[in-house]
Amino acid sequence: MSFGQGGPQSQWDPWKPQSQQQPWNSGDGDNTPDWAALAEASEARAKRRRLLFIGGGALATVAIASAVAVAVVSANGSGQASDGPSSQLPATADIPSSTATEPSFAPTSAPPPLDPKDFVSSAKKDKAPLSPDLLFPGTQLTMGDTVYKKGPTADTRTCGSAAQGTLPKVLDANDCTRLLRVTYTKGDTAVTVGVAVFDTEAQAAKAKKQADKKSIVRSLSGGGVKSFCTGAVCRSTTNSYGRYAYFTVAGFTNGKNVTEKSTAVFRAGDDLAEFAFRQIRRRGEAQASAAAEG
């Protein structure tokens, strides 16, 4: 049975519209389709589709990468502002190198403080004015809760004449240059403190060492202070600091002897010895401070 006219037969293409199909024939004279040929044609078309899809995907990837590159270039362009972290980093040349040389400074040290004792240890450095009223200023002295009234003062260049007992010999042997004295009173208790001046600390220290229990500074009376310690038993002390040796003699203005129970006399003698030491030390401190500022 025949479904068409004779002549050359063409294959059926399922992808063409039916209106464009040519009549087909198996070639053996009947109207049965060539299924093998149709299958090969269909596979070839499917392969071409896959290639087109792969090629299109590659083109899309290239297009996306190009867009990202353009965006990065635009973000780093000179005309664009950016608030990202990378925009806050300095250029490579601006980043300090970890191997950069650290600044170095020459070591400095403050000079040692001046020793006040140095300024009262020799006549060469101890140049401040000196007198009984400068060393013992004011009209009274307060030590703790006790107030002593200041009495007469004296400045003797012949040291031995202002001492008694074995002290004149000690002062003269060590070349004492001056003996400053002042008397303080409280009630019927009186104390004379005498400060012997030498040229060197060694001379003062030697005088202190050579003094004994009979080395006594002569008491100073007058100006309302009665004579004391001229025949009665009194208490005396000896010490030194720098180029100064200082002595005290304490007793009663009524002529009584000092005993171990005379606590007020002992206290007065200790107070005046302590005050003499403080004043000599302050003299050194004042001169050291002036030298440091100058």
Image (spheres, rainbow, N blue to C red):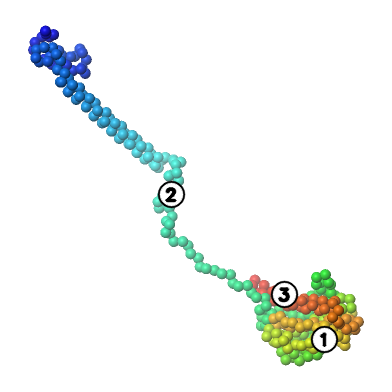
Mark 3 or mark 1: which comes first in sequence?
1
Cα–Cα span, label 2 and label 3: 63 Å
User: What's the amino acid at mark 1?
Assistant: Arg
Mark 2 vs mark 1, foreground winner is: 1
Q: Amino acid at mark 2?
A: Pro
Q: Give residue 129's quadrant in the image.
A: bottom right
Q: Name the residue tied to disc 2.
A: 90
Q: Residue at x 76, y 76 (%)?
A: 274
Mark 3 residue type:
Arg
Q: CA distance from mark 2 to mark 1?
A: 88 Å
Q: Disc 1 marks which residue? A: 218
The quadrant where residue 294 appears: bottom right
Dot 2 or dot 1: first in sequence order is 2
**Mark 3 vs mark 1, CA separation in Å:** 26 Å
Residue furthest to the right in view is 254
Nearer the camera: disc 3 or disc 1: 1
Q: Residues within 10 Å of mark 3 (few under 14, many from 20)?
A: some
Q: Residue at x 24, y 28 (%)?
A: 50
Q: Residue 20: horizontal and vertical position, in percent?
A: 19, 14
As helix, strand or loop, the secondary structure at mark 1 comes to loop
**Closer-to-camera residue (202/4):** 4
Q: Secondary structure at mark 3?
A: helix
**Circle 2 — which element?**
loop
In the image, taking residue 277 as reference, residue 219 lies left or right, namely right
Assess disc 1: are there few (<14), some (14-19) or many (≥20) residues with their C-alpha within 10 Å of its C-alpha: many
Q: Quadrant of the N terminus?
A: top left
Residue tagged 3: 282
